[in-house]
């Protein structure tokens, strides 16, 4: 049986790097770059139009800061997994990204094989972060979730949303959830957005960390 494609959008204002990343991603048969741009405004439009599985987003863009792009996409309930892919290892940038709904944070100096492995891991439901940022991210997320537990009431979910929530925290992608429940992917996306809104989550990463913490 053919493996489902993982669709990826690149938003980065460095053409040579973007081309190199695209060529690297395309070496993996089940990854597919379906869009790319060096402009933030166009990136916002493409994210909403294409609805990719993963968005790789640079912070230091020429027209709009990548963190502002992230905020805008989450305010529009874009459900893609948004990964910051940047040269900045500044703690403030990392925390700001996580606070505003990033699903992970990777540095551009990582090895190509580690980059591809990270993309695979995010589609397998693992948290996506480089080794140098992991401690910062997990420390922040634990503190935030302990302070905000009362805002995440799973009893507000419908029975179908409960089913999807349980699959989300296992790390399943929208495509795999649709296959598991024998429904179309667009229906899954609608439910995911509703779950995020009801439970006050901005990203899958935030929700997964909260779920794991609640089980300890």
Image (cartoon, rainbow, N blue to C red):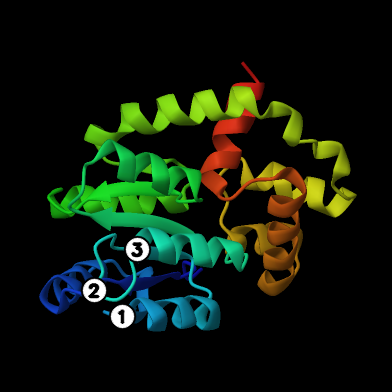
The C terminus lies in quadrant: top right
**Which is more toward the observer, 21 or 173?**
21
Instruction: Give the labeled residue for mark 1.
Output: 39
Of labels 2 and 1, the one closer to you: 2
The numbered dot on residue 102 is: none
Provide the secondary structure element on which disc 2 rests. loop
Image position of 213 (left or right of 103): right
Q: Is residue 121 visible?
A: no
CA separation, marks 1 and 3? 10 Å
* Secondary structure beneath label 3: helix
Neighbours of disc 2 within 10 Å: few (<14), some (14-19), many (20+): few
Q: Distance of mark 2 from mark 1, alpha carbons?
A: 7 Å
Residue found at x 75% / y 58%? 194
Q: Please provide percent x and percent y for residue 112.
A: 15, 55
Circles 2, 1 touching at the beta carbon (< 8 Å): yes
Q: Which residue is disc 3 drawn over?
A: 66
Q: Position of residue 73 (x, y in %)?
A: 52, 66
**Going 34% across and 29% down the picture, which residue do you hit?**
136
Q: Is residue 177 above or below residue 10?
A: above
- Marker count (numbered): 3
Relative to 184, residue 188 above or below: above
> Is 16 drawn above or below residue 203 in the view shown?
below
Q: Are marks 1 and 3 in contact (CB under 8 Å)?
A: no
Q: Quadrant of residue 208?
A: top right
Mark 3 crowd level (few <14, some 14–19, many ≥20, 10 Å Cα): many
Question: Which disc is residue 62 wearing?
Answer: 2
SS at mark 1?
loop
């Amino acid at each position: 049986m053919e493996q489902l494609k993982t669709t990826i959008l690149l938003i980065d204002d460095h053409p040579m790097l973007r081309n190199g990343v695209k060529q690297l991603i395309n070496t993996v048969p089940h990854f597919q770059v379906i869009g790319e741009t060096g402009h933030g405004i166009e990136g916002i439009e493409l994210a909403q139009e294409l609805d990719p599985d993963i968005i790789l987003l640079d912070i230091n863009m020429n027209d709009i800061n990548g963190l502002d792009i992230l905020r805008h996409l989450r305010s529009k309930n874009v459900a893609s997994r948004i990964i910051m892919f940047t040269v900045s290892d500044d703690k403030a940038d990392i925390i700001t990204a996580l606070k505003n709904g990033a699903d992970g944070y990777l540095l551009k100096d990582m090895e190509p094989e580690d980059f591809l492995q990270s993309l695979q891991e995010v589609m397998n439901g693992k948290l996506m972060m480089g080794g140098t940022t992991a401690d910062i991210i997990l420390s922040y997320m634990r503190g935030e979730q302990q302070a905000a537990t009362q805002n995440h009431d799973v009893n507000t979910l419908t029975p179908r949303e409960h089913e999807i929530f349980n699959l989300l925290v296992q790390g399943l992608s929208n495509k795999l959830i649709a296959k598991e429940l024998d429904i179309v992917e667009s229906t899954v996306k609608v439910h995911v957005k509703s779950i995020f809104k009801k439970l006050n989550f901005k990203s899958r990463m935030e929700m997964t960390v909260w779920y794991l913490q609640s089980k300890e």
